[in-house]
Amino acid sequence: MTATDTTFSGGRVGFGSFDNYGRIRDVKVSGVPASDQPDPNAPITDPVPEGPAPADLALVLEEVAQLPESDPTPAPTDPRIMRHNRINYVGEVPDGSGRLYVPDLNGPMYLLDKETGQEQVYLNVREQDPHFFSGRGMGSGFGFVTFHPEFASNGKFYTVHTVGAEGIAANEPTYPNQPNATVQSVVTEWTADDPAAPVFAGTRREIFRFGFATQIHAIQQIDFNPTARPGDEDYGLLYLAVGDGGLGLNTDIPQRLDTPDGKILRIDPLGTDGPDGAYGIPASNPFVGTDGALGEIYAIGMRDPHRFTWDPEGSHQMFLGHIGQRAVEAVYEVRKGDNFGWSDIEGRYRYENDRQCVLFPLTPEQQQKGYVYPVASYDHDSPTNWDCNADSGHAISGGQVYRGPIKELRGRYVFGDLVNGSVFSTDVKKMRREAKQEAPITELQLRDTDGNQLRMTDFVDDVRVDLRFGTDADRNLYLLAKSNGTIWKVTDAERVKPREVVDKKLRDHLVSFYDFDRGFAQNGALEEDQGDANLLLSLVNGGKDMRVRDGAYPGSINSLQTRQVNPETPGNDDWKAGLWDANGVKGLERLAGAEGITVMGWFKMTGDHPALNSNTPDPADRYNAVGLAGVLAGNSDGHGVRALLELINVNGELRLVALGRRLDEGASQTFAASQDWQELLPRDEWVHLAATFDYTTGDMALYRNGKPIDGFYVNEGDPWQVDGTGTSPTLPRGIKIGGSYPQNTREQNPCDCRMDGLMILDTAASKQDVARQYRAFVRD
């Protein structure tokens, strides 16, 4: 069949035709003159420009159970697997008993009462294999369990777990291991003597074994298609999601048909025509009869096929959540014979292993290979000041197509980011490879049963969530997290108005924005930037403990606590936040030569001010200023600023001020509020403040809760040497919040206060701008 033109990021693609498996053939870039075709060597730094948008739905999560703590074996060294436990799925035993099952990578399989949440260890896989290995690698251990559709009568279920070097040496693999294998995945069939028993007793047999060169990307999920019925082609066939073992980076293993790695396999566990008669190979598999190909292969070209599921209704599409390398997290619609292109491509773009920080346009040859592209995806968008070759803390957690009792959620594929715990959804009707564009993704809001808006990081009290999804026979949706070992049930979905707290007219001027609800998953002492600079903010000395549950405005959850720690000694232990680079902070280019800057945010004073001066011998001496938030100058030592909002002593009296400097080597000017600072900033009360700096005119202003504050200029004359141009062209050396010296070389001007919604703009916002932004914050 012939398809119409299809648009996606980077151009317009004309689909020539689809083969029998729905794969794209004869793809050509159309509507673009040959001379304007994309440069095949031009790097693509933002492969999915449109990130998930705020959804108009909020999921209500009710806690079902917190399962017991468990430990990996051998003892781990990677903090990412040192969790409360490592539960990674919840499903329902297909026998009508209503029992939920939950595997824990560290060994136990629990049966769970749906009504009471009471757990029972049904089987401990760790105790069944002396070579059991779960202490190295994110997916090592008891990876998954699935029940045969006729479990109620035949008692059969299947598990996959990993073994280490001793297990590899003691057993022959089904197919040759990857070279120098360090971990091996073992698929086992268990047969219960009594399927209704609360604890397993019965027999087992091994049906598949394969070894991997690294401790990542082994066999992930194994499962049966729950929508298949007796007589259907797919009924009773077992799918195995086999990762590339990390070797896809440097080899073509995911594209080879003579090896199982980097593939989805489909086998008949009750058949006998496979290797050693351990299982059968379905005759309808796409590569059966192909010379040199494994008949078990169902689809190829994968890095880490983490989770797959089927739509319980409609055409029963199969969807795969595929974890990417450095750029793209993708959802694919899976059909037999598919090739998702790894490691030739990632998502829709060319992948080059020696330049992992970027992707590239497909070559004409790649466009002809029939690769299947995502039906939905999002990118990593790594922070500017984070090594792009390092893990930025993103990995898709494949979810479920919701067809349960909550009307507002039906027909949505609900999934998430397993690391930071963001919960996403997209419309299943739009998740089709023949569609003109990928299905748009929205980020769902979350609430507890008391109505509090939270993020998953708040539910688990950790910046790394390790999120998974599950379902039951009634098609309810469950969320679970390794970080605190808890399972939640989605009990409702409430319509909400998506909140955009940044005023639309200021959005293009937003350099940095910190709401302190988005700790960086790789390091809780860093805060993600919601502005265009995309800079990680350091929470100095206090780390993640500086986030407190005290949002300043509707929709905000946390704020930042800064404070003096030990006034008796200059110990560089004060809690403050900021950025610092002696060569200038990359990402703040829009503040170099800026014609205007605005610093604004929410502030709550929580202590006495000014603080005692830890840098002088007099125990009664106090600092002459209280640092709120500002941008450092291009020659700053960590104290000197280009634009600052603070309290400072003016003519013997502490005042709220805007303090700015146009030229790095020039003098500063201060605009001071006339009103008493304690009236402007009452203790324990949230107040929105803004300071604006117009360097072309020399005008400065202060605002409180969206309204101008009367004030006066402190310095006479023209200290800025105003000439109609902007600031020095140098990059600012950083941002300071709650005190000076964000590089933590000295204590000065600490603030015992809380802050929220901190914004830095590359313009001197007008009176109307500030008022609109304040209203954007406070509207509910």
Image (tube, rainbow, N blue to C red):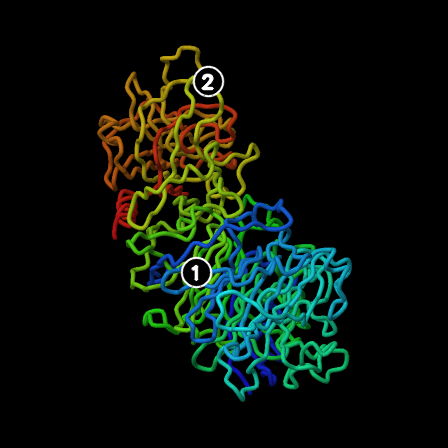
The quarter of the rendered structure image containing the N terminus is bottom right
Q: Which mark is residue 569?
A: 2
Q: Position of residue 432 (x, y in %)?
A: 49, 76
**Callout 2, which amino acid?**
Thr
Element type at marker 2? loop
Q: Is residue 366 left or right of residue 47?
A: right
Q: Residue at x 49, y 75 (%)?
A: 310
Q: How many marks?
A: 2
- Name the residue carrying label 1: 479
**Front residue of this view, candidates 326 and 322:** 322
**Front residue of this view, candidates 172 and 153:** 153
Specify few, some or many for label 2: CA neighbours under 10 Å numbering under 14, 14-19, or 20 or more: some
Q: Residue at x 36, y 52 (%)?
A: 454
Q: Position of residue 606 (x, y in %)?
A: 31, 31
**Callout 1, which amino acid?**
Leu
| Labels 2, 1: front one | 1
Question: Earlier along the polypeptide chain: callout 2 or callout 1?
Answer: 1
Q: Residue at x 47, y 82 (%)?
A: 315
Q: Please say whether residue 633 is visible from this viewpoint.
A: yes
Residue ranking furthest to the top: 618
The quarter holding residue 513 reads: top left
Q: Do the numbered discs 2 and 1 sit on residues whose CB atoms are within 8 Å?
A: no
Specify few, some or many for label 1: CA neighbours under 10 Å numbering under 14, 14-19, or 20 or more: many
Q: Is residue 513 left or right of residue 396?
A: left
**Front residue of this view, candidates 621 and 561:** 561
